[in-house]
Amino acid sequence: MWQRTKNLYHLGIAIISNAWFKFPSRKLTIIGVTGTDGKTTTTSLIYHVLHTAGLNTSMVSSIGAVINGKNFDVGFHVTTPSSFALQRFLQKASKESPSSGATPRNFLVLETTSHALDQYRVFGIKFAVGVLTNVTHEHLDYHKTYENYVKTKAKLLKMSRIAVVNKDDQSYRLINSKFEIRNSKLVTYGLGKDSDINPKTFPFKTNLIGDYNKYNILAAISACRALGVKDEAIRKGIESFVAPLGRGDIVYPTAALGQADFTVMIDFAHTPNAIDQVLKSVRPIVEGKIIHVFGSAGARDVTKRPLMGEMSSKYADIIILTAEDPRKENVEKIMNGIAGGIQNSELRIKNGTLFKIPDRKEAIKTGIKLAKKGDFVIITGKSHERSMNYGHGEVAWDEYGVVRRVLRIND
């Protein structure tokens, strides 16, 4: 009830924001991307394909905004900005580009969260294409049930002229039966042959690893095709795409250092599904042990914690639990919640394959110090984020800087 009341307030702000900035979405072709996992990569993929195809394109995502070729910060722990900030970005994007004379910036790719949809932050925006990557276990503290979560995500599809949906995802069944998209043209993608866009109907080359990235690519292909981009231009963009900051990011060894005994990767995976997918993808290429350093956000969905532990323990030889924005919640309690899903956790602690280190810097240091020849250290959950929340506001945090200092790598 209280959330509904707050959402009415957000709706009022959204209406005012649209009017204040003179409904800028009407001057743009907007592609919205929502889903539990893969939003940022898919958003970046669509932006890159459109941009490399020579189309005037802007983007707003969790790693920042690119508007008319200029970079803007969206704030700490923010994916979809407030309606006022968002409409300001849209207004900037709808203006003529200084480098292109009278040609307007026609396209904008917007990463769209379930909270933004539920709280009317994207109200009034005219979406040409809405993309749903997947709906997995996350945010049930807010949405209460998986069905409610899917229903909220489906709002973007209903707001869009063309809806792009992952046919292989469990959410598709609900969308197709309960939340049928009647007013939009529906395009499906997946690895299966029964989807409209799949690797058979649209072959492509990529440097990205894992089936989860194949899904992100297929989503981007579907969106760009729906916008009329030529297949050759789409393939060229996919092949030249480099993953955004903190997504499967190999930070050691670097090109300057050459070969090294072990590898260090930073990734944003912070849901059970994301952890499962990224670890499953690297497991076949790792000769030695996988050392996984991660935590779970405090004052958020507690039901996902044991599932995160379970997914990690399927692939990781050594697990190091630590802090990840604990807010005012006890870090030990959070780590114990994750450990609850790790099979034989007490035995793992005794034999030195499970550690609980509240200080994230020390946890990362321990993970790297334990690494031997052929090992793979993967640090997940924070990635590009530049702050940590311990319940008393945001404190500066630099995951990359911590890794560099432990490895004694100069910037």
Image (cartoon, rainbow, N blue to C red):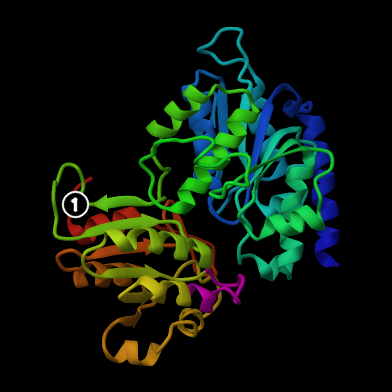
Residue at the spot 61% in from the left edge and 54% down from the top edge: 168
Using the image, determine if residue 74 lies above or below residue 58: below
Say what amino acid the circle numbered 1 marks. Ile
Which span of residues is magenta-colored? 297-308
Q: Which residue is mark 1?
A: 409
Q: How many marks?
A: 1
The secondary element bearing badge 1 is classed as loop
Q: Is residue 214 left or right of residue 286?
A: right
Residue 62 seen by the camera? no
Q: Position of residue 237 (x, y in %)?
A: 45, 29
Q: Position of residue 400 (x, y in %)?
A: 32, 53
Which is the main secondary structure of the residues drawn in magenta?
loop
Q: Is residue 406 left or right of residue 46?
A: left
Residue at the spot 38% in from the left edge and 58% down from the top edge: 281
Residue at the spot 46% in from the left edge and 67% down from the top edge: 324
Placement of the N terminus among the 4 image quadrants: bottom right
311 and 77: which is toward the camera: 311
Q: Is residue 197 left or right of residue 369?
A: right
Report crowding for label 1: few under 14, some 14 to 19, many 20 or more residues within 10 A (C-alpha): few
Quadrant of res 395: bottom left
Q: Position of residue 137 (x, y in %)?
A: 61, 67
Residue 215 seen by the camera? yes
Is 305 a magenta residue?
yes
Placement of the C terminus among the 4 image quadrants: top left
Is 160 a magenta residue?
no
Query: Most extreme residue toward the top, as rendered?
Result: 101
Residue at the spot 73% in from the left edge and 26% down from the top edge: 24
Q: Position of residue 365 (x, y in %)?
A: 26, 68
